[in-house]
């Protein structure tokens, strides 16, 4: 049985916040939605990681204001991509979370 490699990806929060800014969503707006202060949002933009609950809120704002950018940002984190990289063509294992074609 093969072991699935774990790839630790770090999301580019600066790009997410910049994309929101293009749609007139300011750092102040993000802070208000997450219940954090603007300093926390600036920290994320400078390489810090938000808590998971805050990250979900920021990504929901991105999905609402710029669905195309949201899809682009989410693509590297799609589990199907990892499965496709690991499963050998012709392998007959069934995976409950993958659609069978």
Image: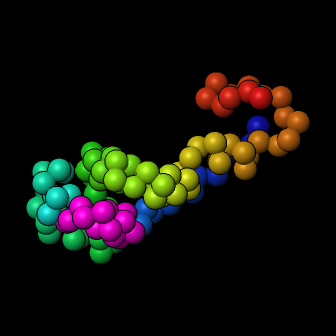
| Range shown magenta | 14-27
Q: Which residue is drawn at the image coordinates 74% and 27% (left, top)?
A: 100
Is 87 covered by the magenta stretch? no
Residue depicted at 21% across the width and 71% down the height: 42
**Identity of the residue drawn at 68% across and 43% down:** 83
User: Which one is in front, 4 or 11?
Assistant: 11
The quadrant in which the N terminus is found is: top right
Give the vertical position of 26 relative to 85 (above or below).
below
> Which quarter of the figure has residue 18?
bottom left
Residue 6 visible in rendering = yes
Task: Residue lying at the far right in this picture: please name it.
Answer: 90
The picture places residue 32, in percent across and down from the top left corner, at 13, 54
Q: Nearer the viewer, residue 34 or 85?
A: 34
- Check the image and tell me how it is coloured: rainbow
Residue 4 as seen in the image, left or right of residue 37: right
The verdict on residue 24 being magenta is: yes
Please, what is the dominant secondary structure of the magenta stretch? Answer: helix
- Residue under the point 16% across and 58% down: 29
> Is residue 17 visible in the rendered structure shown here?
no
- Quadrant of the frame with the C terminus: top right
Quadrant location of residue 96? top right
* Number of numbered discs overlaid on the protein picture: 0
Give x and y (percent) for residue 58: 29, 53
Residue toward you, 84 or 61: 61
Q: For this view, does 39 lie left or right of residue 81?
A: left
Q: Position of residue 60 (x, y in %)?
A: 33, 46
Residue furthest to the bottom: 46
Q: Is residue 23 left or right of residue 42?
A: right
Q: Is residue 48 above or below residue 93?
A: below
Q: Position of residue 76 (x, y in %)?
A: 56, 56
């Amino acid at each position: 049985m093969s072991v699935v490699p774990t790839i630790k990806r770090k999301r580019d929060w600066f790009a997410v916040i910049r994309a929101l800014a293009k749609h007139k969503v300011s750092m102040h707006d993000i802070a208000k939605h997450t219940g954090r202060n603007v300093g926390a949002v600036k920290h994320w933009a400078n390489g810090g990681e938000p808590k998971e609950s805050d990250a979900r809120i920021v990504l929901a704002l991105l999905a609402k204001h710029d669905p195309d950018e949201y899809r682009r940002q989410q693509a590297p984190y799609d589990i199907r991509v990892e499965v496709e990289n690991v499963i050998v063509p012709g392998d007959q294992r069934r995976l409950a979370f993958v659609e069978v074609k």
